[in-house]
Structures are given as C-alpha cells and as structure tokens.
Amino acid sequence: MEASEQSTSDLAKQAIQVCLCFHSRKGARAITQVFDRALAPSGLKATQLSLLMVVGARQPIKIGALADDLVTDSTTVSRAIKPLLARNLLDIEQLSGDRRIKSLRLSSEGRRMLDLAIPLWQTAQTQVVRQLGNTMVQALLPGLEAASRLGPANPD
C-alpha cells in the first residue's frame, strides 16, 4: 500500500471512530429494525407509524409543518404519505383556496390502525429501553432532540 493510501486509510479509521453522522445513522438503523419487527403485524414501518403519530397528535397539520416536525422536506413527506393515503389511513384536504397548501388528519381507519400499532410500538420501546438501559435512554432523548435542531432550517 502506498504512503498516501495508508495515510487516507488511517484518517478514515480515525474519523469513523468519532463520526457523529456514521454512529447516529448506524444506531438509528438498529433501533428502526427493532421497531419494524415489532410493528410487522400492523403492516406499518416505524417511519410510517412515526408519521401517523405526529399527524394524530397535531391534526389537522399542514404538510409543511409535518415536514418540519420530521426534519425533512415537503416532497419527501408527500412521497411518504402516498401509501398511507392508499390504505385510507389519512385524510387530506386543501386549505384556503390555495391548491398547494394541504393538511392531514387521521381517517377513522388511521385512528383504528394507531390504536392497533401503539401496543406494538410499546413492546419495541420497552425492548430498546431494557437493552440500552433507562439511564442511557434518558441521556439520549435530549441529545437527539438537540441534534434534530441542526437541520437545514438551522444552519448555524
């Protein structure tokens, strides 16, 4: 291996040990897998349940506000809600005569699905808390919330 390749390899090894992006995404994928397995009987993915929970908590909610809550953009939210609309879990309505401004609510089927999925979510939540330990979880939650404020809307 050439000296420049060795140097690059060493730098990469050092960086990966402390890279917040790498470790947060790795942790998020592992946690998401636990929730996806627990939610399988509902036919929902963890990302879909999160979206339904935010809509249920804040309804009616504009798509732009939902995107802000999820730290993503409106286009991504629009794509994410398509399967939920197809399953009649959400109702969508236009606001104030502007076709671009839409809000979401849980449909009656969406409320039923949330009622079914929340106990499955609780099982996964309990498993993750048990495996990580309550102290770790109580330290992670405020840190992750603070990290969520680093998104594009908050470039500083």
Image (tube, helix red, strand yellow):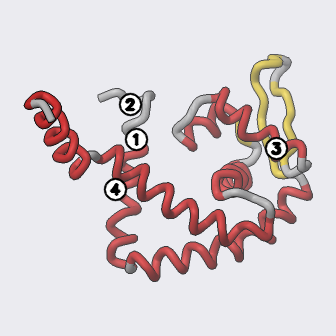
Give the mark nearest the N terminus, 2 or 1.
1
Q: Which mark is residue 83?
A: 3
Q: CA distance from mark 3 to mark 4?
A: 31 Å
Q: Position of residue 49 (x, y in %)?
A: 69, 57
Q: Quadrant of the C terminus?
A: top left
Tag 3, which secondary structure?
Answer: helix
Give the mark nearest the N terminus, 3 or 4.
3
Mark nearer the viewer, 1 or 3? 3
139 above or below 29?
below
Give the mark nearest the N terminus, 3 or 2.
3
Q: CA distance from mark 3 to mark 2?
A: 30 Å
Mark nearer the viewer, 3 or 2? 3
Quarter location, residue 63: top right
Q: Which residue is mark 4?
A: 143
Front-most of 138 and 42?
A: 42
Pointers 2 and 1 in contact (C-beta within 8 Å): yes
Q: CA distance from mark 1 to mark 3?
A: 28 Å
Q: Which residue is mark 2?
A: 154
Q: Residue furthest bottom?
A: 130
Residue located 30% across and 47% down the image: 20
Count neighbours of disc 3 (C-alpha within 10 A) and say few if under 14, some if 14 to 19, many if 20 or more.
few
Front-most of 21 and 104?
A: 21
Q: Which mark is residue 149?
A: 1
Tag 2, which secondary structure?
Answer: loop
